[in-house]
Image (cartoon, rainbow, N blue to C red):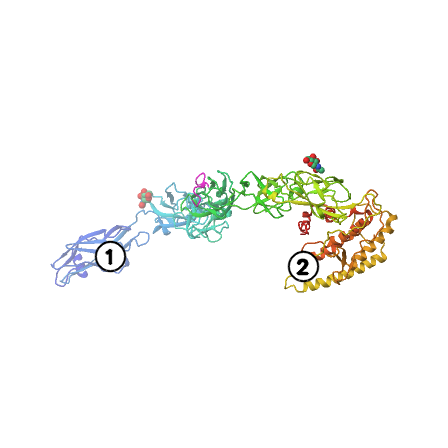
Amino acid sequence: MEKLKLLYFLLGVIGPGGGTLLFIGLPNSTTLMENQPAGIVVYTFSVNSTSDLSVTPTIINSNPLTSAFTIDQKPPNYLVVTTGNPVLDFETTPSSFDIQIYMKDDTMATNLQILTVQLANVNEPPVFLDNLATQVVTIYIQEETAQGNIYTILASDPEDPTSALTYSLLPASAPFTVSSTGVIRSTKTFDYETDPHSYSLTVKVTDSGGLSVNGSLVVMITNINDGTPYFTMTTTTFTMPEEENPGAVVATITAKDPDNAGFISTLYYSINTPNQYFSINELSGVIQVAKRIDVDAKTLRLNNIISLEIKVTDLPSSGNSNYTTINITIQDINDNPPVCTQYAWSYAVPETQVNGSLITDLRDQCNDIDIDPINNAFNFTGMSGLGSNERFQMIPAGSGKIILTGNLDFEDPSNIGAGNEYSLTISVQDIASPYYKQNIYVYIKTIPVDEYPPVFNSSSYVFNVSELSPPNSIIGYVYATERDYPYIGITYTLEGDGSTLGATSIFWIDPNTGVLKLSDYADYETKTQYTLLVKATDSASKFSTATVTVNILEVNDEKPVCTPNSYTLSVPINQATGTNIQNFKLTCTDRDSGPNSFQYVINSGNINNHFAFSPSSGSNVSSLVLALPFDYAKGGDTTWNYKLKVLINDGNLLSDSPQSKAVVQTGTVSLFINVYIPGLTTTKTTTTPSVIYVTKSENVYSPAAWYIPFVCTIGALLLLGFLGFLAYLLAKYCPCKGHTKPDTEPLLKPAEKKIKEDVFLEMTKFNTVFDGEAVDPITGNVYEYNSKSGARRWKDTKQPINTVPVSPQLPVSPTEQTSLPVQSSGTPNKKVKTPSTAVKAEDGAKATMPGTPNKLQTSQQTAPNLESENKSSPSRFPISPRHSPKVSPKIPKTPPA
Ligand SMILES: *[C@@H]1O[C@H](CO)[C@@H](O)[C@H](O)[C@H]1NC(C)=O
Ligand SMILES: *[C@@H]1O[C@H](CO)[C@@H](O)[C@H](O)[C@H]1NC(C)=O
């Protein structure tokens, strides 16, 4: 014990004051298990001190290992506890080391005790030598990577690094294995899109002592761009209306990239089909209208479905692409009105168009190009018409068929007149919204049709016209009316009446007025009644006819014609009165007078009224009788040759017409009567006939035409001179007396020519020099005179001037011959007043013509052939004189006063 006290002292346990300071319960050595954590109480001790003052035991040695301990001061106990730093590992730290604990009190007593710590080895689990020891190790495997080693575990047993360890991997379902040497291997090829994207593995390493350590591994499967995008929209069929504005959204294409499942991925869209109508947003896949679409246009009309191939790709270029086709149906909208080829129509419809006729079908002329049957349907509505009066209707309603439901007859006063037209207004309108509408105007003009023939106001006409009516006289009127409206015109014509054309040609009808006129004289004696057919023709050649009976009214326009017309008789001086002279009779006819109408009047030459006709009237036959006896012996009679002019009047007693009664026509007969004394062989010379024709010409001139007498005088002188010269030439050179007009009488015998020429010479010369003759009032002798010079001479009536043989049965006195030239020369000059010089000259020139043949005939055939104008006129004009166009027919017939 002493020894220990000493040691204490030495050690300071016993301070100088004699106090003591001692560790109580602290051994010098202790055993500690390795790897103790902090806070483990290695030993608990207390302190024995003489001082009451506090003592603080402290570990004072500087061994780094001492920091693994500290002294927890809890007086009166003091605890040696581990700090855990450093961890006292048997394999890495000295297995035994000292801890010096020092303490000191206020008595300055100190004490130091060494605590030897003896480490004890314990069996430890294996430890990882890699990152598994401290963290979760993450391993990345790219998908599609072939199976194989992915990691090698590094671990060892702390007690014996060379000892074998056992490895295991959990969970067992994971597609990984670990080898006995700690190599982890994948057992499959991963697909990121189908497999889990990560695996959490626990590695367990166990040592031979059964201790193990766990490590955590996470295997991440990494994605690569190996998937093809696919479309995700539910339909590929879309519809849209036409005429959408550009920008309108039509469809949205959606797609996904399998590589990016669960992530926001970027895909790129495009339209692979060339098209002008649509565009697609490259990133959003929204399809929009790029251009207005008119489904009614040509190509889309045929197929209103637009197919587009859509492409989606996961990279702007060279990515994985996919395609799909979408169909966009363009729906028709009613965006087009009905369109007609024109909106104003004109029709010309004949007025005879029957009720119910189709005027027009407007539907044929209109069309709506909208393709939808609803949108392209249209109707015709609201027909209204100016003046149509329901005359036109649309049947069936709305059809566009315009039907005539009335009449268009112009003759119907309720219709509009010609030249106007009905005007209809019709609307053509869509039946679907927005009810496009357009007006159509239909103009219907009515064409007049010639429906009715003209109608005469009488089916037959009877007109009377005098046969004396001159051409251009109005016979009457025919009148036809035309029921057709408008009235255009009627033309009147004459049709044949079945007789010759010549018969109808004396009528003329005014084609416009229907006035029937004479174009020539009618002749009752030729035809008393005409039946004409008058025709009224309208503009369309419709016609009707009416008969026109024209009665030619009889007028006493024919003069009696008696035979013989001229005759030479011889009557013995002792002829008994009341007896017929030479059995001579006049037989008369008259075309328009009866046989009882004749009156016989001896107009001139009946000196002493010796001669008379019996009966003097009432018969067509009358005899010449001697009324009074001759008395030459007492001088009562001096005339031996009578020239009687007999006028035969037709009283026309049978006609009832007062007008015709007033007209008396007169025929003329010339008779030459010689009185002879029976028994005498030579002809007794007698005085010249007491009837003398005196030429008298008179002209009336206008005072203004002062030159006419002058010209006429000069002309007459020249004519006379010429005639004289011509006569001289004829007398000198021409044995045949010049040309004569054709004659029906037989010509002379050649043997008699010489004689006759001599006679003619005398007469011609006579005519040439002395152009007139007259009776001396004192002597009663005839003298001749020249009208120009006034020269005169007695006419030699006693000398026979020819020796022409007379007719054997008709003894002719020589004196008779001398009278012939007197009459002949007088005949041509016997004229009435003529109004103009032209006619006068013509007549004057012509006047010589009848005279010439008369002389010739006289010379060859004697008296019977010597005829007055009464004979010559009919022969020259075989046709009735009034038919002669140039010469006024009546004038020559008027007897000279
Ligand atoms: C290791 O892991 C297994 C399973 O998860 C477990 O049962 C065991 O207790 C763990 N051991 C250690 C030392 O953690
Ligand atoms: C004369 O009249 C009678 C009737 O009175 C008639 O028979 C006869 O034929 C007429 N003669 C001529 C020539 O006309």
Q: Which residues are magenta?
A: 384-399
Numbered circle sitting on residue 265? none
Horizontal and vertical percent for residue 706?
A: 66, 64
The crowding category of the residue bearing disc 1, from other C-alpha atoms within 10 Å (few below 14, some 14 to 19, many at least 20), is: many
Q: Nearer the viewer, mark 2 or mark 1?
A: 2
Sooner in the amino-acid sequence: mark 2 or mark 1: 1
User: Which residue is at the front of the view, 618 or 537?
Assistant: 618
Mark 2 sits on what residue?
699
CA gap between label 2 and label 1 equals 210 Å
User: Which residue is at the front of the view, 211 or 627?
Assistant: 627
Amino acid type assigned to the residue bearing label 1 in the image: Ile
Q: Residue at x 73, y 62 (%)?
A: 715
- The outermost residue toward the right is 751
- Is 726 on the left-hand or right-hand side of 173? right
Task: Say if the magenta span includes residue 756.
Answer: no
- Is 587 on the left-hand or right-hand side of 529? right
Horizontal and vertical percent for residue 65?
A: 28, 57
Question: Considering the numbered disc 2 on the image, is that residue within a helix, a strand or a loop?
Answer: loop
Numbered circle sitting on residue 99? 1
Number of dots carrying numbers: 2
User: Which residue is at the front of the view, 184 or 825?
Assistant: 825
Amino acid type assigned to the residue bearing label 2 in the image: Asn
